[in-house]
């Protein structure tokens, strides 16, 4: 048996290892979470007339109010309205685009779902098809052109997030070219800058070889210009302002590391779209990146206590509990973190949890920090049943070796 001093030294060394592991593991968890959360950022939902009310408000219809429903995460209610629009206007590209937008937000609630990914791509493909058919009959319809570009932009964003670079650039360039032509004819339509700004900024984030190969076919990629174009939409856009703000918030949070600006943007979006849980999560993440864990915890707790917040699925609700657990862990409140990770596990289905190895890994770290080595090993072993993202299987095996024999 070890003496008291030997036990204390061993415990201190083990605590240092766990603390370091928590920080390194946390970085990877957030890196992957940023990819998932990026899927939740809407890119375009606008009227191509640049503020002409008659184009948005047809008799008996309000696309502006529909957009508000979607941003407020009333996806079921929005779906019923969209079905009505499509039934009455089967050749109009607008309702098909809003159908795509609603599917995008539905996917945001459960990004690991293959069926939701498929349904989103089907909706986006239909949106593009209808817009192209409409433009053949009405080649000068700027509204149809805008929604064609918007549909292409969503497809591009999806492919960027799944690392399908050439497909992403193909659709991104098409969206940008369409929007450029609209701006050439209607320079006061600032919303069209959203597709162009997104395309320019994302080009600066491509891997080096891919960027070189794509640039050979004439692609631009000026990040500074892209940000300026997005700010133009955020400041002067009419129907795409929320979309531009959300994208700028994400850029500041995950790419430019301007956390105070990210907090400012997501605070405003959370206040204006009270029922949308995505903006709450992004706000909490912004606070966490700035080292303000208490504010991050408070943001998650308020969202969970607010009955008006609409969660698209129990898996998305579980994700909010996982976020809260993560911030508790970073602030050293390990027991509370363990409780929240347990709630996440109880709410989410097995398929969803298999996509999130860091949930079990972080729970194991918290148990280890509380010297509950038997439970820690159990959690680490559960990691091995998940997908091996960010080398978590190797991390778990090292952690099992570290704690084995300590109980």
Image: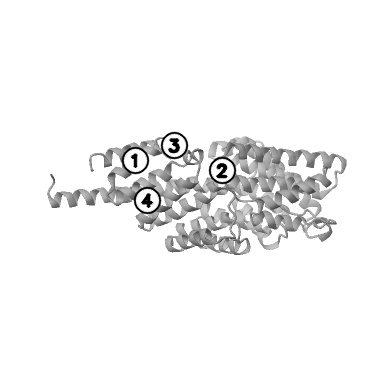
Contact between labelled residues 2 and 1, with CB atoms less than 8 Å apart: no
Residue 125 lies left or right of residue 352; in this view the side is right
- Closer to us: 318 or 398: 318
- Circle 1 packing at 10 Å, graded few (<14), some (14-19), many (20+), is some
SS class of the residue under badge 4?
helix
Can I make out residue 46 in this image?
Answer: yes
Residue 312 lies left or right of residue 19; in this view the side is right
Residue drawn at (47%, 38%), measured in percent from left and top?
A: 354
Closer to the chain start, of discs 1 and 2, is 2
- Circle 2 packing at 10 Å, graded few (<14), some (14-19), many (20+), is many
- Circle 3 packing at 10 Å, graded few (<14), some (14-19), many (20+), is many
Task: Name the residue that disc number 3 marks.
Answer: 386
| Up-down relation of residue 169 to residue 230 (above or below) | above
Closer to the chain start, of discs 1 and 3, is 1
**Residue 309 point in image, percent of width and height:** 58, 58
Task: Name the residue that disc number 1 marks.
Answer: 378
**Seen from this angle, which residue lies furthest right?**
137
| Up-down relation of residue 127 to residue 233 (above or below) | above
CA gap, disc 2 and disc 4 = 25 Å
* Disc marking residue 300: none
Closer to the chain start, of discs 4 and 1, is 4
Residue drawn at (58%, 46%), measured in percent from left and top?
A: 204
Q: Given this view, does label 1 or label 3 mark the residue nearer the observer?
A: 1
SS class of the residue under badge 1?
helix
């Amino acid at each position: 048996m070890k003496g008291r001093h030997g036990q204390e030294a061993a415990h201190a060394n083990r605590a240092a290892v766990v603390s370091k592991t928590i920080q390194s593991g946390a970085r990877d968890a957030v890196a992957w979470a940023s990819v998932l959360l990026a899927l939740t950022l809407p890119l375009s939902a606008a009227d191509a007339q640049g503020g002409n009310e008659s184009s948005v408000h047809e008799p008996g219809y309000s696309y502006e109010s529909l957009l508000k429903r979607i941003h407020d995460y009333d996806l079921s209610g929005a779906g019923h309205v969209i079905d009505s629009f499509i039934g009455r206007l089967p050749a109009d590209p607008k309702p098909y685009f809003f159908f795509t937008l609603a599917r995008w937000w539905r996917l945001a609630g459960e990004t690991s779902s293959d069926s939701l990914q498929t349904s989103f791509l089907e909706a986006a493909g239909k949106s593009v098809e209808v817009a192209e058919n409409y433009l053949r009959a009405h080649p000068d319809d700027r509204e149809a052109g805008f929604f064609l570009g918007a549909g292409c932009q969503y497809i591009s964003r999806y492919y960027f997030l799944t690392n399908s670079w050439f497909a992403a650039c193909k659709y991104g360039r098409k969206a940008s070219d369409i929007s450029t032509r609209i701006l050439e004819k209607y320079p006061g339509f600032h919303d069209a800058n959203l597709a162009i700004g997104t395309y320019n900024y994302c080009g600066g984030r491509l891997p080096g070889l891919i960027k070189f190969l794509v640039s050979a076919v004439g692609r631009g990629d000026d990040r500074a210009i892209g940000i300026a174009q997005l700010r133009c939409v955020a400041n002067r856009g009419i129907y795409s302002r929320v979309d531009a703000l959300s994208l700028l918030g994400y850029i500041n949070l995950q790419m430019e590391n301007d956390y105070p600006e990210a907090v400012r943007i997501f605070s405003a979006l959370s206040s204006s779209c009270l029922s949308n849980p995505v903006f709450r999560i992004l706000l909490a993440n912004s606070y966490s990146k700035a080292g303000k864990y208490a504010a991050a915890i408070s943001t998650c707790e308020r969202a969970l206590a607010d009955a008006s917040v609409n969660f698209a699925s129990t898996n998305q609700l579980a994700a909010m509990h996982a976020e809260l657990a993560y911030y508790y862990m970073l602030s050293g409140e390990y027991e509370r973190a363990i409780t929240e990770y347990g709630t996440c596990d109880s709410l989410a289905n097995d398929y969803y949890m298999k996509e999130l190895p860091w949930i079990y890994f972080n729970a194991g770290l918290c148990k280890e920090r509380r010297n509950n080595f038997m439970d820690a090993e159990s959690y680490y072993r559960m990691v091995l049943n998940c997908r091996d993202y960010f080398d978590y299987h190797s991390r778990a095996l090292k952690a099992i070796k570290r704690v084995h024999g300590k109980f």
